[in-house]
Amino acid sequence: MEDSRIVDLYWARDERAITETQTKYSRYLMTIAYNIVADTGDSEECVNDTYMRAWNAMPEDRPDQLSAYLGKFTRNLAIDIYRKKTASKRKDSEYALCLDELDECISAGNTVESEIEGKLLSKAISDFLRGRSAEKRNIFICRYFHCDPIKDIAEKAGMKEVSVRSVLLREREALKEYLRKEGFEV
Amino acid sequence: MSGSDDKNKRIDASMIMDSMGDIDEDLLREADAFRQGVNGDLNNIKSYDGERRRKKKRPNLIALPIAAAAVLFVVVAITLGRSTLNLKNSSTDSAASYDSGSSYMGEVAENADEDAAASDSSYEDSSERYELDNELSFEPSDNTSGTDGFDYSDAVSDSEAEATSGEKEESDYSDNVGEEPIAEETLREFAINLPEGYSFGEVTEFDTYRKGMLILPVQYENENGDAPDRWKASGSYSEIDPVGGVYVNVIFEDGVPTEDSGIFENHTSSERLKTYKCEELEGEWYCIESYVKHDLYSAAQLENTTDKDATSDYYVFLYVMDGADTYYELTLSAKCFTAEDAERIARSIKIN
């Protein structure tokens, strides 16, 4: 079913909206969730909560791109679960690996998260990505939004894993430099 | 953003990841198209393999008992082999020295069962596989037997220094703490000329992407710290998986490693010294030479220590070749070796 039809169902408060969403996007959302929490049960919980969140939010929202809209919900829910469950110990997930990779170039320290407008940082990252080639941009988003394993990204991009790692390394460095120029302390 | 008062705020990796979750949707749409592949089906994405991973983790009820039996057999064989070696060669300490920590011990034990001259044959075997034992004379000396902690050098041919070498063996390996030796794994045959007074430790899995041996003795104290053994030893020799982890980033252009290629480690700074074609190895191998400083302590730990060495410094020689399935790395402590000495040792490397 077309995304617009599914959105119509949400707006009409028709429960088939969830069934159709499930049919079309369950595996896509499970991928995002599993890459972060590395647990099937938790992933299913995230995906089910995504449907619920979409159900509650949809009358106001009218997303153009349903996959991205739902994907963001799933991603945020999964990160919440990841944090709750790994307060004492990091789990072995692609999300954890992504954090390690970013730690390589983005220094930890006394962050001032509460003072930072997350949206400013998001906008800066979006602007940065727009300035990159499509290939680099997609590789970066696959890794750090969807938390896709490098092996899968390499397969999708028709590249060697080592080349994808190289692209990611350079992009992280470029992002660091960009954010620094934009006034962030990294 | 420019000129905003919100600037100059420190950000970290998790904030970047959080903010990635709110990037513009048109960018996600494009990335989704990229991920969909040729058939445009989002469910075609392969990443979700939870069931497969879970199956991998399930114990294999057939293989486990067999593996356990094999391990038991090897342990018994090693024990018997040790006894045989010690009984038959009680006058030569080098047997004990070799016995003490090598991953090649299993082969020694097997040979010992077959050969009446157990210790001799096992040394021959080990010397073939582990050629550096024969080449440990950086500055050749007439008196190489049982002097300064030469565990493996004793295995060359010397059988005179039993007591000395035996004692040394104990003290040397007691330095090799913390990281697990991997008994079932071996390294490729290699040779390096080490100066007198230095020896190799056990084959150890240093990290997910590297295994190798420490060069002993330990040089850096690390009171209250938790630095890896590799950062405290006189050096190390490692085999490195070129695609193993985020830390290995070696890029080639026309077969030559680029300027920013290298191994990246946390709490480590590295200065590239030079890159040169490595004539000592067959093929298009290059050696990337760097001067590396490892932080032995975190800032908090540093406040509670009296150690004078806050960092450990090494000359690092990374041997790489485009398309190779393994890279090699030799590190030599700057505390023990001058740059010239380190380079001379590095140029003695041979790998089969």
Image: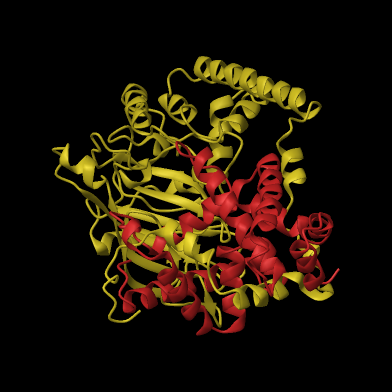
- Residue A163 in view: no
Q: Residue at x 61, y 82 (%)?
A: A134
For residue A182, above or below residue B310: below
Residue B266 figure quarter: bottom left
Q: Nearer the viewer, residue B278 or A76?
A: A76
Q: How many marks?
A: 0
Q: Residue at x 58, y 64 (%)?
A: A145
For residue B310, above or below residue A120: above
Expressed as whole percent of the image width and height from the top left, the position of residue B335 reads 22, 51
Q: Residue at x 62, y 67 (%)?
A: A142
Q: Colour of chain A?
A: red
Residue B34 horizontal side relative to residue B329, left or right: right
- Residue B101 in view: yes
Expressed as whole percent of the image width and height from the top left, the position of residue B267 reads 33, 54
Residue A146 horizontal side relative to residue B278, left or right: right
Residue B144 figure quarter: top left
Expressed as whole percent of the image width and height from the top left, the position of residue B190 reads 51, 52
Q: Colour of chain B?
A: yellow
Q: Residue at x 29, y 41 (%)?
A: B197
